[in-house]
């Protein structure tokens, strides 16, 4: 990554403005020049009144020069203020154009998705011979010496060639695809385009990404039930893909801790994504009046397998969370918060990475907790509305936040920070999804702390009670596992 990759793009916060961090820093400097020039001009005019008459008689041009300097400073102050206003208006105009483009693309892709849904059965029927031929070609290619012959080989190839899966254009296409998922399903069900627009995300919101995920779960459940009836139980001990199980949450460690002082420090405390490791951490502190406050950290997906096994933070929980259901990871978070002593009314800051960001938003939406703020990192939450102040951080190459569709969630306290990692820098190999790496998000969080954008500063100021950097507290880690039914 290069210096150019340190650029942040900030939007939301009740404003149409879309500004880069460079624009925010320039506006900050212009406001400083405006106020300081005005103050200096006032001081010079005060000095002019204090000039000794004898000095003025010996150097008659001095008072005039002082007043001229004051006038020049006044002019500089006015021009700095005008430039700052122009910069702000430019950011607003950019945001309006971007929003108009997104709205147009959303409508177009929605109509296209609905039409494709109507045509899908015919396209599949007409394309069957071509699919068969294509499958034969793929089999032949796979049989070549040196070709990848297993999912393990394919995964290794992706780790060594991450460019496709970490491409901003691909991520943008995925956003559009998932935003149109409701239209595609509506088309499959025979709903006309106009009606689909009315009931979907862009209309009454009766059917969207969450409902589409719910249909996937319903289909998986029905398939599992059919397998059970036909074969006396699904393979794998009666388990079925994407079907929920009970969960057990265990306290695995407690240690003293000092309150974080920044967004970067919050992200540094996020549980690492690792098998058998803790996925949840709860920090407890005392407020100024002695009442408890909490920071809850929720980690990312550990097991990407669709078949639920022991790991609670898995693909089944992912799909459940996308559908607003009570997946194993969500139930584990509720159990951990209960064990930590969180009661209704206790101030809570939710911090989540990847799947954990979905859980953080779900917990805020539940209304069961006094959530004072939410921070998400690389999470598919772009269409999930929140009431509490929310800071959403996403990399433009990252496919995971793209799974949440276009970023349509809004509000005065909803701030989206985007960063492009690999514009001019070589992409690291050895990781299939380096743009989703937690360490990369930790680095971006440090840039967020340094941002001069007023919307970012407002969020950080609002989170200040949790970011004292000095309060003593206790951190408790939890491990959640699925258990047999």
Image (cartoon, rainbow, N blue to C red):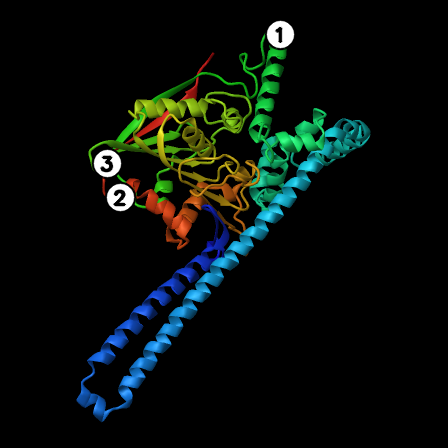
Query: Of callouts 3 and 1, which one flags the residue occurring earlier in the amino acid sequence?
Result: 1
Residue placed under numbered mark 3 in the picture: 287
As rendered, which of 30 and 354 lies closer to the eye?
Answer: 30
Front position in the image: 280 or 407: 407
Percent across and percent down for residue 225 are 60, 11
**CA distance for labels 3 and 1:** 56 Å
Dot in front, 2 or 3: 3
Q: Residues within 10 Å of mark 1 (few under 14, many from 20)?
A: few
Q: Nearer the viewer, mark 3 or mark 1?
A: 3
Q: Which residue is mark 1?
A: 229
Dot 2: element: loop
The residue lying at 47 percent from left, 32 percent from top is 358
Instruction: Evaluate if marks 3 and 1 touch, with contact meaning CB atoms under 8 Å apart.
Output: no
- Element under disc 3: loop
Residue on which disc 2 sits? 468
As measured in the structure, the alpha-carbon distance from the residue carrying label 1 to the one carrying label 2 is 58 Å
Question: Taking 258 as reference, is 184 left or right?
Answer: right
Nearer mark to the viewer, of 1 and 2: 2
Quadrant in the rendering for residue 483: top left
User: In what element is the residue under mark 1?
Assistant: helix
Q: Residues within 10 Å of mark 2 (few under 14, many from 20)?
A: some
- Percent across and percent down for residue 411 are 46, 41
Quarter where residue 25 is shown: bottom left
Crowd rating for badge 3 (residues with CA inside 10 Å; few <14, some 14–19, many 20+): some
Residue 45, how many percent across, how many down? 27, 76
x%, y% of residue 317?
49, 25
At a point 49% along the width and 63% down the height, the residue shown is 86
Label 1 or label 2, whichever comes before in sequence order = 1
Residue 411 shows in the view: yes
């Amino acid at each position: 990554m290069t210096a150019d990759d340190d650029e942040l793009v900030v939007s939301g916060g009740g404003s149409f403005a879309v500004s880069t961090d460079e624009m925010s820093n320039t506006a900050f400097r212009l406001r400083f020049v405006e106020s300081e020039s005005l103050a200096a001009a006032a001081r010079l005019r005060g000095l002019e009144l204090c000039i000794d008459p004898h000095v003025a008689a010996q150097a008659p041009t001095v008072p005039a020069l002082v007043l001229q300097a004051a006038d020049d400073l006044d002019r500089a102050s006015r021009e700095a203020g005008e430039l700052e206003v122009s910069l702000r208006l430019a950011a607003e105009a950019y945001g309006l154009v971007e929003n108009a483009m997104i709205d147009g693309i959303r409508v177009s892709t929605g109509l296209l998705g609905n039409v494709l849904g109507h045509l899908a059965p015919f396209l599949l029927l007409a394309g069957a011979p071509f699919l068969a031929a294509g499958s034969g070609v793929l089999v032949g290619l796979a049989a070549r010496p040196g070709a990848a012959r297993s999912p393990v080989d394919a995964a290794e190839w992706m780790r060594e060639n991450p460019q496709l899966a970490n491409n901003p254009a691909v991520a943008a296409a995925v956003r559009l695809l998932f935003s149109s998922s409701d239209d595609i399903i509506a088309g499959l069900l025979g709903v006309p385009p106009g009606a689909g627009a009315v009931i979907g995300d862009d209309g009454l919101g009766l059917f969207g990404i969450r409902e589409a995920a719910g249909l996937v779960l319903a289909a998986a459940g029905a398939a599992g039930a059919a397998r059970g009836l036909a074969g006396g139980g699904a393979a794998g001990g009666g388990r079925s893909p994407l079907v929920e199980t009970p969960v057990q949450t265990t306290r695995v460690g407690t240690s003293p801790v000092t309150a974080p002082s920044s967004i970067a420090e919050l992200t540094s405390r996020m549980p690492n994504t690792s098998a058998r490791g803790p996925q949840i951490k709860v920090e407890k502190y005392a407020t100024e009046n002695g009442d408890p406050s909490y920071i809850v950290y929720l980690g990312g997906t550990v097991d990407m397998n669709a078949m639920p096994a022991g790991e609670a933070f898995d693909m089944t929980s992912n799909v459940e969370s996308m559908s607003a259901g009570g997946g194993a990871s969500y139930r584990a978070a509720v159990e951990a918060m209960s064990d930590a002593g969180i009661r209704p009314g206790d101030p809570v800051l939710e911090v989540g990475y990847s799947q954990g960001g979905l859980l953080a938003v779900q917990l805020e939406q539940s209304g069961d907790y006094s959530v004072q703020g939410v921070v998400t990192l690389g999470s598919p939450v772009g269409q999930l509305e929140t009431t509490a102040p929310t800071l959403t951080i996403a990399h433009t190459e990252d496919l995971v936040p793209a799974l949440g569709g276009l970023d349509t969630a809004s509000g005065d306290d909803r701030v989206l920070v985007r960063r492009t990692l690999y514009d001019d820098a070589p992409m690291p190999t050895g990781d299939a999804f380096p743009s989703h790496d937690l360490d990369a998000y930790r680095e971006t969080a440090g840039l967020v702390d340094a941002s001069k954008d007023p919307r970012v500063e407002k969020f950080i100021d609002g989170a200040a009670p949790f970011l004292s950097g000095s309060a003593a507290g206790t951190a408790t880690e939890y491990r959640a596992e699925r258990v047999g039914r």
